Image (tube, rainbow, N blue to C red):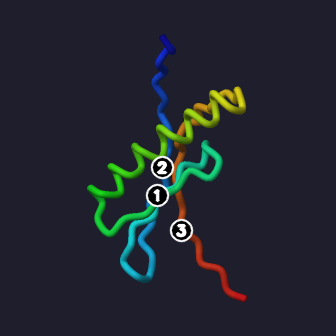
Amino acid sequence: MKKKYKYNLSVIIEKDEDGYYIGHVPALASCYTQAKTLPTLYKRLKEVVDLCLQVETDNFKRTIPQNTFVGIQQLEFKG
């Protein structure tokens, strides 16, 4: 039986111009999803994180970084 691990992963959630919520897990390659509501986004994030963890640990034998969340800033850039 495969050993289960517990991960604490940071998730970035943004809302796009069409009103969709987009969730991204920086610690996992290509791990993101979107939904029209937050409850649906949370459900989809769980599904996609489970898949990404399986790929990262089984296929690539990669250790998942357990980074500590520090903060987030929204900055404005002008060109």
Residue 23 is tagged as: 1
In the image, 13 versus 73, the foreground residue is: 13
| Residue 21, percent from left and from top | 39, 67
Circle nearer the N terminus (1, 3) = 1
Asked where in the image residue 15 lies, by quadrant, the reply is bottom left
Mark 3 secondary-structure assignment? loop
Q: Residue at x 47, y 38 (%)?
A: 50
Q: Which quarter of the figure is the C terminus placed in? A: bottom right
Circle nearer the N terminus (1, 2) = 2
Mark 1 secondary-structure assignment? strand
Q: Amino acid at mark 1?
A: Gly
Residue at far front of view:
1
Q: Amino acid at mark 2?
A: Val
> Which residue in the protein does label 3 denote?
74
> Which residue in the protein does label 2 denote?
11
The answer for how far apart the CA atoms under marks 3 and 2 are is: 16 Å
